[in-house]
Amino acid sequence: MADETETRLLAIFRALSGADRHALQAYAEFLAVRGETGAGYAGTRELQPEPRPDGESVVMAIKRLTRSYPMLDRRKLMGHTSQLMAEHALQGRAAGEVIDALEVVFERHYRETVQRET
């Protein structure tokens, strides 16, 4: 049975786009860390979000981070991301600064989620 499941999962993985493959891998690693068998796995790999492209907009950064952290509850991130987006759009805060702050917010929520689940 495990061989069939692994074969099916590999077929699905191969059919995905690069970004979706990254999201699936990130989610699988999250599950491995929080699961009962994850104790030995937790220290072996850190989540590696998609790299930040040059000239990225704030909206694209939010989309990239959402793909990189598919296990996070978006509702819990809404307040922070909305505030930072408003600072950029309405107050003129530089995109690079806002993206830096967004990366910190997503990373912090990820760490809190992993800690809560383990």
Image (spheres, rainbow, N blue to C red):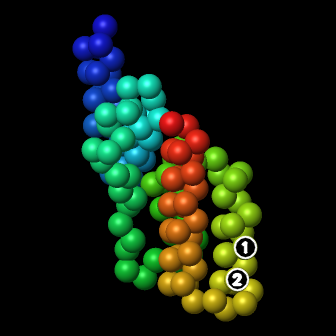
Q: Position of residue 63 (x, y in %)?
A: 53, 61
Report which quarter residue 32 is drawn in.
top left
Q: Position of residue 118 (x, y in %)?
A: 51, 36
Q: Residue furthest top?
A: 1
Q: Nearer the viewer, residue 52 or 41?
A: 41
Q: Nearer the viewer, residue 105 or 27?
A: 105
Q: Which residue is mark 2?
A: 87
Q: Secondary structure at mark 1?
A: helix
Report if residue 12 is visible in the image.
yes
Q: Which residue is mark 1?
A: 83
Q: Nearer the viewer, residue 49 or 32?
A: 32
Please name the amino acid that badge 1 sits on.
Gln
Crowd tier of the residue under label 2, counting other residues whose Cα lies within 10 Å: few below 14, some 14–19, many 20 or above: some
Q: Position of residue 92 (x, y in %)?
A: 67, 91
Q: Give the quadrant of the N terminus.
A: top left
Residue shown at 40%/46% (left/top)? 26
Please name the amino acid that badge 2 sits on.
Glu
